[in-house]
Structure formats: C-alpha cells, structure tokens
Image: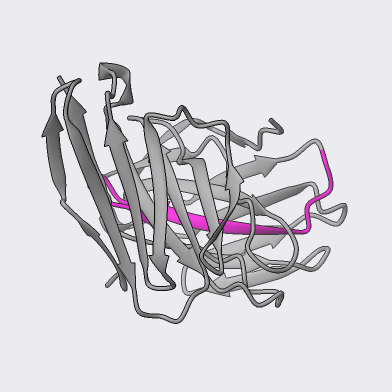
Amino acid sequence: DTEVTQTPKHLVMGMTNKKSLKCEQHMGHRAMYWYKQKAKKPPELMFVYSYEKLSINESVPSRFSPECPNSSLLNLHLHALQPEDSALYLCASSQDSGTSTSGIQYFGAGTRLSVL
Amino acid sequence: GQQVMQIPQYQHVQEGEDFTTYCNSSTTLSNIQWYKQRPGGHPVFLIQLVKSGEVKKQKRLTFQFGEAKKNSSLHITATQTTDVGTYFCAKGGSGGYQKVTFGTGTKLQVIP
C-alpha cells in the first residue's frame, strides 16, 4: 500500500477552470515530486521540492503552479489548461538525506485528469 | 535530455516462460532503479542497484547492473499472471533529492 495520498483520484475540468491537485505523505521525506504520465509513456518529471523549496522546474508551462505548504504537503494548481494536458499526474516523495537510498521514489496512486 | 532506452517495448509470454528486459544508457550511471506499474496503477519501487556488476534477487526476479554501469537487466523466471505490467528502469543522481529519469519501459503480458 502506498503511503503517499493523492486527491482527487479523477478530475474533469474545462479550459477556463482553476483546480488544484493535492498530495500528502507522512514518511518524513523531505523531497517531493510531481510527474506527468501520458498513456503508454514513462512518467516525466515536472517539479522537485527539497526541504519545501522548489529545486527543479523542468520547463513546465506556467499554467501549472506547484506549492509546498509544509514538508508533508504538495499541491499543483492548474489554470487555463489545454486538452493535451490530459494525463495521469503522479506525486512522489523520497528521502533527501544524501544516502544511497535517498532517491528511491514512493508514488501516490495519481490523479487522472481530463481537460475538455 | 538523456534518455534511457529499454528493450523490448512489448513482450507477450506464455505463463511459466521466462522474461527479460534490458535497460541501456549512453552515459555511466550512479545507480539504477527498477519500478513496476500494473495496468491502471502507479509505479512501485522494486530495487536499486549501485555497484558495478551487482546482482540482486527477489524471489523469481533477478536484477543485474553492468560492469561498466551503463546497462541493467531484469529477468523473471517462470512468469505468472501477477507479473503483468510495465517494468521501468530509472536512472538517479547522487545524494539528496534526485532527478530521476525513467526508461521507456517494457510492457509484459502473460498469457495463462
């Protein structure tokens, strides 16, 4: 069972809507990630937060806005999305300890997003 | 970006047959991770390999890291229907948070 919880599980939104995806973990991990996964493709990294600071932005369009309110929570705010943004959005967390296991990713079940 | 290629892209096997997927990188890897994603599910971590030539086993699964740390393989002995899913290798960085890049994946179908 995953210890990373994502809500909602499914989301349908119009191109003018504003919505947010939420992610929570209680494993004490200090690194949190957002990935986008299209059908039959591998997860693609979008953002990495380390100790609540944005560390990596993989040139993601500004219509996606991440937020890390505290070490357990990660949000992804969505605004003016396009139909091609429809995908499975996965949150993950990992230790940020500099040890050999610090990069192991623990994924949530994802939010399946449809943009109409 | 630097892609990690996996072959084959798809594999159908009869239940009880063996299965192998290969992961290749053009650059030397700090470590390689393997994940399994069931249909409709999310990636689940299987194992991490760090040392050159490392071999690790988990029941019917055998993972290898190449001597040059540029390739890796996952071998499943006597597949079962529960093995169905997509297997991804992923290259990580070193230390702290990591920029993990997933391989292209191999989708395994097991025919009962």
From what the image shows, is residue B73 above or below residue A59? below
> What colour scheme governs how the chains and residues are painted in the rendered image of this protein?
one colour
Where is the C terminus of chain A found, in terms of image quarters?
Answer: top left
Query: Which span is picked out in magenta?
Result: B27-43
Q: Position of residue B31 (x, y in %)?
A: 72, 60
Q: Nearer the viewer, residue A65 or B53?
A: A65
The residue drawn where x is 66% and y is 37% is B4
For residue B61, side relative to residue B33 (left or right): left
Q: Position of residue A68 (x, y in %)?
A: 42, 60
Q: Position of residue A69 (x, y in %)?
A: 38, 64
Where is the N terminus of chain A found, in terms of image quarters?
Answer: bottom left
Q: Does the segment drawn in magenta span residue B33?
A: yes
The residue drawn where x is 53% and y is 58% is A49
Which quadrant of the structure image shows residue B64? bottom right
From what the image shows, is residue A33 above or below residue A113? below
For residue A106, side relative to residue A2 (left or right): right
Q: Does the segment drawn in magenta span residue B58?
A: no
The residue drawn where x is 57% and y is 31% is A59
From what the image shows, is residue A22 above or below residue B112? below
The residue drawn where x is 27% and y is 50% is A110
For residue A10, side relative to residue A67 (left or right): left
Q: Position of residue B79 (x, y in %)?
A: 38, 56
Residue B32 seen in render: yes
Residue B44 seen in render: no
Q: Nearer the viewer, residue A49 or B18?
A: A49
Q: Nearer the viewer, residue A61 or A96?
A: A61
Q: Nearer the viewer, residue A93 or A42?
A: A93
Count of marks overlaid on the render: 0
Q: Residue furthest right?
A: B68
